[in-house]
Image (cartoon, rainbow, N blue to C red):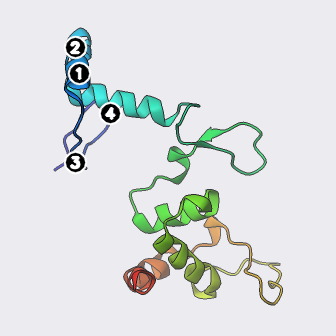
Amino acid sequence: MPKKSPGGPRGAVLNVRVPTRLKFGLDLVARRYRESVSDVIIRALNDHMSSENGGLLGYVGDNEHAVNLLPLVWDDNEVLRTVKLALIQPELLTKTEELVWAAVQADDKYWAKSPGAKKAKAGSLPNRELAALQLEVLEADWPELVKAASA
C-alpha cells in the first residue's frame, strides 16, 4: 500500500546514491522545516519539474508559453499515459513506445469514427485525437503491442 504523505500517495521506490555532503545538507533542510528527508526530496523534485532551468516544460499546440508537461501527460493508466505523451510530446517517447504508437495510430480499430472525418491521403496517417480513442479496445491489445514492439 502506498504511503500517504504531503506530496501525494507514494507507491514507487527510488534508491539514489548521493555525496555525503549533499545527504548532510538534506538532513539540515529536513531539520529546519521539521519534515522528513523524503518530503524534502519530493518537494525539490516537484520544484525542479516545473523549473525553466532543466525542468519538464514544453510548448504544446499554439501556446506561446512553455507549460509543465507532467500534468498534461500523467495518468495512472499506462495505456492512456502513453497515448497522451504521443499526442502531446512524441519526441519524449522511448523507441518501444514509438513502435507501439505507430501501430496504434495506423490501426483504425483503436479510433472512433468521427462524423465528417476525411480519409487520410495515401501513405499518411490520419490525425488522431484523444477523444476518439477506443480505450477498452486498446487496453485489450496493449500487452501484445508492447511485446511485438519490444521484440
Count up the numbered dots.
4
Tell me which amino acid carries mark 3.
Val
Q: Are marks 1 and 3 in contact (CB under 8 Å)?
A: no
Amino acid type, mark 4: Gly
Q: Secondary structure at mark 4?
A: loop
Which element carries disc 2, helix, strand or loop?
A: helix
Q: Give the quarter of the figure containing the C terminus.
A: bottom left
Residue marked by disc 3: 13
Residue 2 vs residue 46: left or right?
Answer: left
Which residue is at 25% across, 43% downward? Answer: 10
Asked where in the image residue 132 lies, by quadrant, the reply is: bottom right
Q: Which residue is mark 4?
A: 7
Question: x, y (%) of residue 83?
Answer: 54, 66
Q: Nearer the viewer, residue 71 or 20?
A: 20
Nearer the observer: mark 4 or 1; the answer is: 1
Q: Is residue 126 above or below residue 76?
A: below
Q: Nearer the viewer, residue 84 or 93?
A: 93
Q: Name the front one of labels 1 and 3.
A: 1
User: Marks 3 and 2, how far apart in space?
Assistant: 23 Å
Q: Where in the figure is residue 3, as x and y percent of width and height?
A: 19, 41
Picture residue at 29% right of the left edge, 25% below the top: 40
Gap between marks 4 and 2 measured at Cα:
20 Å
Q: CA distance from mark 4 to mark 1?
A: 25 Å
The residue at the far bottom in this view is: 122
List the residue tagged with mark 1: 21
Q: Nearer the viewer, mark 4 or mark 2?
A: 2
